[in-house]
Amino acid sequence: MNEEQIIEAAKNGDRRAMAQLVKSYEKTIYNFAFKICRSPERAENIMQETFLSMVKSLNQFDGKSKLSTWLYRIVANHCLMEVRKNRHQFVSIDDDEDGYYDNNFAGDWNLEPQNVTENEELKQILDEAITKLSPEYRVVFLLRDVEGLSTEETGKITELSVPAVKSRLHRARAFLRKEINEAFKR
Amino acid sequence: MKENNVTCKEVMSHICDSLGEELDSPKCIAIKNHLDECTDCRQYFNSVEKTIEFYKLYNLEFNPAMHNRLMDILGLEDK
């Protein structure tokens, strides 16, 4: 069965088909939740909430978008609700765009991205940098750059126009690069 | 020029897509020419690319216990 057929079967009450859908997306949804909230425990809770929503509302999925896009919208909403509880810790980048385009290259950028999972110091730098970024920018950066969704799909999920997605993406990239560069200088 | 197994065309496509420009648009061609000549911009661009790659590759393991807890909560079985 292809995914469309599995979705139809799950909508018609086939529990095995529903389990198959969960299995197809659990890892992606868990890691996306982690990339936004930066806590393994909270990411697991958000993943569970997301699939509870999917099981409850799959009949409302009209098939006009990909199932993954629909799930990203659900998980992004759950994540935003969760991380907004700590709004005070974010840096606002709405008003100071130029301040984040730092073309200083004093940081050591020789680390290979492939080694990120074994490098605890680098993981800490990445966690600290993205935790400072406001959730609305974080979601756009993660959907577009990290998950590889199109600008249009990212706009649909976040309910932003295409120019707004591009603007947030530029600022988020510049902010993160600057934060990481600062850390690499230390 | 090859950057971490990514071709120049992919790199330019990524930049130009973000800018809302077609690959063969005058602005995209001008950016490519500028990147070829400007070491600072090239370094900046490479570090942005590396930033994205870091976050792409920073994933957590999804273990069977997490899968089992999820299936329990959803009242689903693997069979």
Image: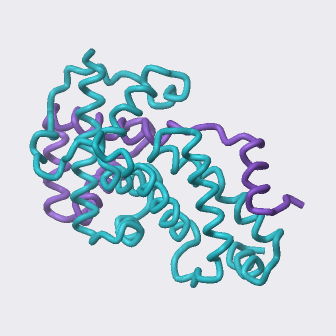
Chain colours: A cyan, B purple
Q: Nearer the viewer, residue A170 or A96?
A: A96
Q: Quadrant of the N terminus of chain A?
A: bottom right
Q: Position of residue A180 (x, y in %)?
A: 30, 29
Q: Position of residue A45 (x, y in %)?
A: 60, 50
Q: Position of residue B7 (x, y in %)?
A: 39, 46
Task: Using residue A6 as the reference point, say whether residue A79 is left or right of it.
Answer: left
Q: Nearer the viewer, residue A170 or A97?
A: A97
Task: Using residue B51 as the reference point, say whether residue B73 is left or right of it.
Answer: right
- The quadrant holding residue A60 is bottom right
> Residue shown at 27%/15% (left/top)?
A186
> Residue shown at 55%/44% (left/top)?
A42
Task: Using residue A76 as the reference point, say whether residue A185 is left or right of it.
Answer: left
> Residue shown at 30%/52% (left/top)?
A137
The outermost residue toward the top is A186
Q: Is residue A62 above or below residue A18?
A: below
The outermost residue toward the right is B79
Q: Position of residue A16 (x, y in %)?
A: 83, 68
Q: Is residue B53 above or below residue A52?
A: above
> Residue shown at 46%/59% (left/top)?
A76
Q: Is residue A185 above or below residue A172?
A: above
| Marker count (numbered) | 0
- The quadrant holding residue B66 is top right
